[in-house]
Image (cartoon, rainbow, N blue to C red):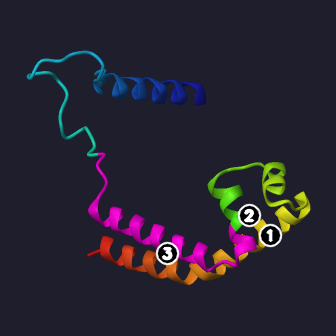
């Protein structure tokens, strides 16, 4: 009995899937083709998202500028330039363990600086979505 129910459910799902017609976007279609523009999403960035992204970038740049030089250098080399720990240590003429410590401290400082501001941006953004 349970097998019959499962088999019927599987058949019903296959029937439903068969009614949904898919069309390759790579195949050329005429103007009267079956693709509905309503099915295609608008992938452009929303203006509010662009503004939010720019605000976050500006906040991040300012916060990085506020870091003490020794921490800023390590952060920029490791997280922005994506240098290895060894390369960063060689460039700055410090030990690899000191690179790790400074990077950890730089990230913590940035988190403390950015967290309250990012929460404020996030709150404003959520309020705008529901209006």
Mark 2 residue element: helix
Magenta segment boundaries in residue numbering: 43-72
**Which one is in front, 88 or 123?**
88
Mark 1 residue element: helix
47 in the magenta segment: yes
Q: Quadrant of the N terminus?
A: top right
Cα–Cα gap, marks 2 and 1: 7 Å
Tell me what residue is drawn at x 41 percent, y 72 percent.
Answer: 55
- Would residue 86 be found to the left or right of residue 80 on screen? right
- From the top left corner, tell me how far across and down residue 46 is, in percent: 29, 58
Q: Which residue is mark 1?
A: 102
- When the figure is inspected, residue 127 is found, relative to residue 98, above or below; the finding is below
**Which one is in front, 17 or 67?**
67
- When the figure is inspected, residue 65 is found, relative to residue 21, above or below; the finding is below
- From the top left corner, tell me how far across and down residue 60 is, in percent: 53, 71
Query: If you read the primary sequence from the N terminus, does the residue marked by circle 2 or circle 3 appear first?
Result: 3
Tell me what residue is drawn at x 39 percent, y 74 percent.
Answer: 126
Query: If you read the primary sequence from the N terminus, does the residue marked by circle 2 or circle 1 appear first?
Result: 2
Q: Quadrant of residue 12?
A: top left
Cα–Cα gap, marks 3 and 1: 21 Å
Q: Residues within 10 Å of mark 2 (few under 14, many from 20)?
A: many
Q: Residue 59: which numbered mark, if any? A: 3
- From the top left corner, tell me how far across and down residue 131 is, in percent: 26, 76
Q: Residues within 10 Å of mark 3 (few under 14, many from 20)?
A: some
Q: Residue 74: which numbered mark, if any? A: 2
Tell me what residue is drawn at x 58 percent, y 79 percent.
Answer: 115
Q: Residues within 10 Å of mark 1 (few under 14, many from 20)?
A: some
- Would residue 24 be found to the left or right of residue 103 on screen? left
Q: Main secondary structure of the magenta part?
A: helix
């Amino acid at each position: 009995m349970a097998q019959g129910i499962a088999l019927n459910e599987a058949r019903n799902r296959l029937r439903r899937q068969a009614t949904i017609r898919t069309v390759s976007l790579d195949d050329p279609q005429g103007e009267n083709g079956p693709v509905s523009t309503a099915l295609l999403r608008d992938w452009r960035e929303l203006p509010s998202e662009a503004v939010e992204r720019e605000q976050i970038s500006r906040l991040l740049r300012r916060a990085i500028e506020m870091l003490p030089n020794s921490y800023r250098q390590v952060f920029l080399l490791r997280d922005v330039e994506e240098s290895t720990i060894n390369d960063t240590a060689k460039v700055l003429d410090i030990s690899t363990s000191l690179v790790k410590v400074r990077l950890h401290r730089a990230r913590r400082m940035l988190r403390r600086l950015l967290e309250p501001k990012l929460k404020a941006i996030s709150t404003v953004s959520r309020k705008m979505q529901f209006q």
